[in-house]
Amino acid sequence: MPLPRTFVASLFLFSLLLLHLVEAQEQIINMDGAPRPAPQSAIDCGVACGGRCRLSKRPNLCQRACGSCCARCKCVPPGTYGNLEFCPCYANLTTRKQVRKCP
């Protein structure tokens, strides 16, 4: 037995309303005054890590570690040292011995 058109139309309108409510809830959560994280855009890890590792005593090791961190986190902190608050994922990656992995 086929479903009546009114039932299908009602179901469609209900799903649109539910989608709208979910999006409105996300906006309310993001309006808590905290800065929104920057949208994840494509980053050239080679260039970003080149800048990060340019003063390193071991540039090849630094480039390799930074490259793997950048590939995973899609960001590299600015400057040659520190500034880890700009990329929390980068700051939280550790080795097996719980030593910070990213330069």
Image (cartoon, helix red, strand yellow):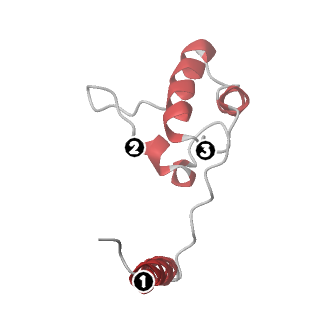
Would you say residue 103 is visible in this rendering? no
Up-down relation of residue 96 to residue 73 (above or below)? above
Would you say residue 72 is visible in this rendering? yes
- Residue at the left extreme, as displayed: 97
Give the image location of residue 79, x and y in percent.
68, 41
Give the image location of residue 58, x and y in percent.
58, 15
Query: Which residue sits at x=62%, y=59%?
Result: 38
The label on residue 14 is 1
Relative to 21, 81 lies left or right: right
The reply to whether discs 2 and 1 touch (Cβ–Cβ < 8 Å) is: no
For disc 2, the neighbor class at 10 Å (few under 14, some 14 to 19, many from 20) is some
Q: CA distance from mark 3 to mark 2?
A: 12 Å
The first of marks 2 and 1 along the sequence is: 1
Q: Which quarter of the figure has residue 93?
A: top left
Kind of residue at disc 3: Pro
Considering depth in this image, is 9 or 83 the residue closer to the camera?
9
Query: Which residue is under mark 3?
Result: 77
Q: Which numbered mark, 3 or 1, is in the foreground of this view? A: 1
Query: Which residue sits at x=53%, y=82%?
Result: 33
Label 2 secondary element: helix
Q: Which quarter of the figure has residue 75?
A: top right
Give the image location of residue 71, x and y in percent.
54, 31
Query: Which residue sits at x=52%, y=82%?
Result: 31
For disc 1, the neighbor class at 10 Å (few under 14, some 14 to 19, many from 20) is few
Relative to 10, 51 lies left or right: right
Up-down relation of residue 67 to residue 87 (above or below)? above
Kind of residue at disc 1: Phe
Give the image location of residue 70, x and y in percent.
56, 34
Query: Which residue is under mark 2?
Result: 92
The reply to whether discs 3 and 1 touch (Cβ–Cβ < 8 Å) is: no
